[in-house]
Amino acid sequence: MVAREIAPLHFVVCAAPAYLARHAAPGKPSDLLRHNCLRLGRPGIDPGGWSLGRERSVIKVKGNLVAGDIVTLGAAAVHGQGVALLPLPFALPLFREGKLTPLLTDCVARHAQLFIHYPNRKGLPARVRSFVDFMLERLRANPDLTSDPRELLAPFGRLT
């Protein structure tokens, strides 16, 4: 297998306006301990804490939902079920539509690197090579993936 790097993947804490109407927005990472945090993982297995900010301080959050995928986690957050830690490229359209609000914007975390994987280059069909090249070109040019997260979150104001 070949793995080609696309971009860093940043995560941001966020919640729906409906949730924030019922609960005060967290002002610092430790405030998350008083919130229903929607977590990514597998039911029955402790998903661990959220690593936030440059210092990568880990907050051992709790909540009533552990989802197995980002889409389910995002849907629960949009429906006001709690606070979520979502990949920034996934969350940005929801911020722009007003469905979610970014929180603790000084604590955006870089958790992963985004890669495209494909079989060994030797004997790779031309259509697969073309697709990989097309995807790399498109994704590496996508400002939601390549811009500084602070710049991407700036239009939503300085939120804590």
Image: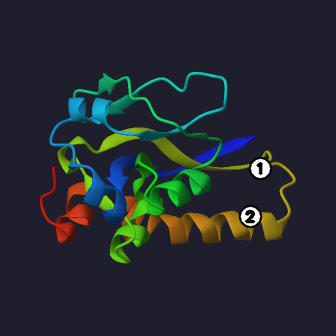
Q: Residue at x 33, y 40 (%)?
A: 109
**Which residue type carries mark 1?**
Arg
Q: Is residue 17 left or right of residue 73?
A: left
**Where's residue 96, x and y in %?**
34, 75
**What is the distance, in whole Å, between disc 2 and disc 1 at their CAs?**
8 Å
**Which residue type carries mark 2?**
Arg
Q: Residue at x 38, y 77 (%)?
A: 97
Q: Is residue 45 left or right of residue 105?
A: right
For mark 1, what is the residue? Answer: 121
Q: Residue at x 52, y 37 (%)?
A: 64
Q: Is residue 122 left or right of residue 39?
A: right
**Where's residue 55, x and y in %?**
22, 27
State yes or no: discs 2 and 1 in contact (Cβ < 8 Å).
yes
Secondary structure at numbered mark 1: loop
**Where's residue 104, x and y in %?**
22, 46
**Sooner in the amino-acid sequence: mark 2 or mark 1:** 1
Q: Quadrant of residue 94?
A: bottom left
Residue with the most extreme bottom position: 97
Q: Residue at x 63, y 71 (%)?
A: 134
Q: Is residue 119 above or below residue 136?
A: above
**Considering depth in this image, is 21 or 126 the residue closer to the camera?**
21
> Can residue 54 be seen at all in this image of the molecule?
no
Q: Is residue 58 above or below residue 80?
A: above
For mark 2, what is the residue? Answer: 129
